[in-house]
Amino acid sequence: MPVEFGRAFNRAHDIRQVADYTGDLIEADDVSWMIQQAADFVELVKADLH
């Protein structure tokens, strides 16, 4: 698993913590980035399973 995914998960966690516990809004760019990271991760796992 590339180290970049660990960094991405940490960043996504931080963003979610802000939204969940401070009530601050998340920027649309951050949401798009998190969705893309998740999609890339799923594709990597699918490729590893085949």
Image (spheres, rainbow, N blue to C red):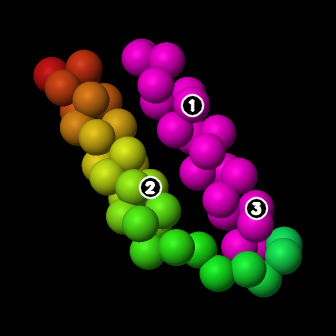
The residue sitting at 67% across, 51% down in the picture is: 13
Can you identify the residue that label 1 sits on?
7
Q: What residue is drawn where x is 41% and y is 17%?
A: 2
Between residues 6 and 33, which one lies in front from this camera angle? 33
Residue located 52% across and 73% down the image = 27
**Does the magenta stretch mainly form a helix, a strand or a loop?**
helix
Q: Amino acid at mark 2?
A: Met
Q: Residue furthest right?
A: 21
In the rendered image, is residue 42 in sight? no
Q: Of the residues under marks 2 and 1, which one precedes in the sequence?
A: 1
The part of the chain drawn in magenta is 1-20
**Label 2 CA crowd tier, 10 Å (few <14, some 14–19, many 20+):** some
Could you tell me the amino acid type at mark 3?
Gln
Neighbourhood count class around disc 3 (C-alpha, 10 Å): few under 14, some 14–19, many 20 upward: few
Q: CA distance from mark 2 to mark 1?
A: 12 Å
Residue 15 locus on image (x, y percent): 65, 59
Vertical comparison of 29 with 42: above or below = below
Q: Are marks 2 and 1 in contact (CB under 8 Å)?
A: no
Residue drawn at point x = 31 percent, y = 30 percent: 45
**Near-viewer residue (9 or 24):** 24
Residue 17: mark: 3
Q: Secondary structure at mark 3?
A: helix
Which of the two labelled residues, at mark 1 and mark 3, occupies the earlier sequence position?
1
Q: Is residue 23 visible?
A: yes
